[in-house]
Amino acid sequence: MLRAWDTNFHPTFAAGRAVYLQISELIATEIRRGRLQPGTALPGTREIAKQLGVNRKTAVLAYEELLAQGWLEAQTTRGTFVSSQLPESTPTAFAPAAGRPVEAPGFRWQDPSEPEQPPVAIPGALVFNDGTPDARLAPVATLASAYRRVMQGRGRRNQLGYDNPLGSLPLREALSRMLNQDRGLSTTPASICLTRGTQMALYLTARLLLQPGDVVAVENPGYPPAWQTFRLLGAELAPVRVDEEGLCVDELEALCQRRPVRALYLTPHHQFPTTVTLRAARRVQLLALAARYGVAIIEDDYDHEFHFHYQPMLPLASADPHGVVIYISSLSKLIAPALRVGYVTGPAAFVAALGRLRALIDRQGDTVLEQAVADLIDEGEIKRHTRRAHAEYHTRRDALADALRQLAGNFVEFVLPAGGMALWVTFREDVDLELVTEELARRKVVITPGSRYYLEGPAANSVRMGYAALTPAELAHAVEQLGAVLRQHTSGAKSTT
Ligand SMILES: Cc1ncc(COP(=O)(O)O)c(C=O)c1O
C-alpha cells in the first residue's frame, strides 16, 4: 500500500459556497501547482475528513467532484490517486507556431462596407454628433432596477429560455398601443417584429426584399449606414434629390418610369441629414406612386418624439391602404443608442417572415431587456422621460441656433428645423470645412463635414450639428470656438459669392 500524502491543509472555509467545492478546488490547485504529482496517493475520505475538520460525507463529495473533473482516479482495491492524465495538460504542437497574428485571410470573403475613417476620439472634447440623445437625461436607474427585477423574477420561475423570435409579447403589446394611439398606425402585436435597433431592422427588411441587381432609391443626401446594408445585398443605389420640401417625388417617378425600383429608403419625418419634413402633398403623391409601381417604402422614423412647433405629421405608414410601407423605428434617440431595441411593423405576412429570418440570425433579442422596457412604458416612465427630454432638446435647439447667429452669423445659414436633434448648417463657400474641422479639434470641439452624406455630388458645404447631447453652456462654448476659428481662417466679411 502506498503511503498517502499528508495534506498539511489548514483551510478556513468561506461562507456562502459549498465546503466540498472549496476542498475540491484546494486539491485541484495543489495538483496544478505540481505539489501533487500524477500517481500520488490521497488519504482515504475518513482520514482527509479528520485532517480538514469536516464530516466524511463532505470529503466523499469533494473526491467525487475531483473524479468527475478528471483530477483524480480511483483504483478499486488500492485507493484514490492523482490522475495520470490531468485535464489541463499542455496541448501538443503539431507544427511550428505561426508566431504572429495573420493579417490577410487565406480565403475568399466579402467586406461589408467601404472603410470609413473612424472619428478621432479626443478626450474631453465637445462633440457635435449626428444627433444622439443625452444619456445623462435617460431613466437609466429605473431601467436598471426594472432589468434586475425581471431577471431575478424570471430566474426564480425558470423562465429564461427561448421566446418568440418576433420579440417578447409584453413589449410588442406596449409598442402596438403606443404606435396606434400616438402615431396613427393600425398595428397588432403580431404585426411587430422587435430588433436590436434600426440597423438590424434595415438588414432584415432588405434581406427579404432585395435580390442582387435590384434598384433601391435613396435620399441624396441621406443615411450611409442604410446604403451600405443595401449594397451588401447586391442592390444598386439610385440617388433621388432632397429639397426644402423633402424628397423630390417627381424625380422618383421619373426613375420608376425608366427602370423597375424595388424599394425606397426614406426618413420623411426629419430628413437625415437635412432635417426637412416631407410635405403632406408629396406624401400623398408618394404613396400613390409606390402602389402604382410596386415600390416598397422603407420608412425610418428615427426621432419621432422630438417635434417642437406643431403636432408632428403622422408617419406614411398611418395612411397606407395598399400595404407598401415598412415602418422602422427604435429607442436609440429616445433613450440611448446603447439600448439595442428597435422594431419593424408592416403587412402581417411580411412581418411573420421577418420573425423567421430573425430566428436564423439571432434567435431572439434580449427578452429580459424587452420586458423591462415594456414595464417602463406601462408605468408611464417613458412618457415622463419623453416630456422632460422634449422640453430640454427644444431649449438646446434654440440655444445652438442663438449661439450660431450671434457668434458665427456671418459665416453660416440654416433653417430652424421643426424638430429632431440636429441642425443642418451650411457654411459660406469660402469656408474650408476640412481645415475648420482640424483647427476645431485642436480646441477640443468635434464637427464632421456633411460631404459624407452624399451619394453623388455636388455636396453642400454643410455640417449636421447634433445639439441634443450637449447642454446649453457646452453648446455656447463650442460655438464660441467655432466662431473664433472661422474668423481666423476667413476674411470675416459676408461673402457675396
Ligand atoms: C437616420 C437614422 N436612422 C436610425 C438611427 C438609429 O439607428 P439604431 O436604431 O440602429 O441605433 C439613426 C442614428 O443615428 C439615424 O440617424
Image (cartoon, grey):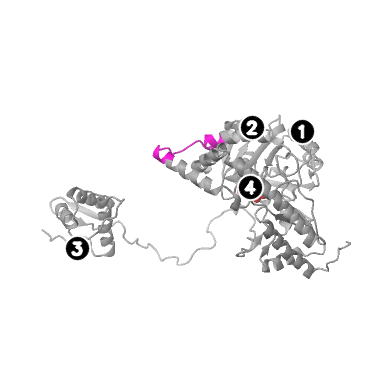
Secondary structure of residue under mark 3 = loop
Q: CA distance from mark 1 to mark 4?
A: 30 Å
Q: Main secondary structure of the magenta part?
A: loop
Mark linked to residue 18: none
Of 64 and 14, nearer the camera is 14
The residue drawn where x is 53% and y is 34% is 169
Please name the residue that numbered disc 1 is placed on: 288
Which residue lies under the disc numbered 3?
8
Report whether 232 appears left or right of 398.
left
Residue 442: percent from left, percent from top: 67, 69
Q: Quadrant of residue 347?
A: top right
User: Magenta stretch containing residue 25, yes or no?
Assistant: no
Residue at numbered disc 4: 333
Q: CA distance from mark 2 to mark 1?
A: 17 Å
Residue 466: x %, y % from top left: 69, 54
Residue at disc 4, CB closer than 8 Å to ligand 1? yes
Q: What is the secondary structure assignment of the residue under circle 4? A: loop
Residue with the most extreme left position: 1
Image coordinates for residue 444, horizontal then vertical, percent: 66, 66
The numbered disc on residue 347 is: 2
Label 1: state its secondary structure. Answer: helix
Residue range in magenta is: 153-172
Image marks 1 and 4: residues in contact by CB distance under 8 Å: no
- Residue 117, picture quadrant: bottom right
Please report the residue visible at 82 percent of the width from the left and 62 percent of the height from the top: 410
Disc 2 element: loop
Dividing the picture into quarters, in which one does residue 281 lie? top right
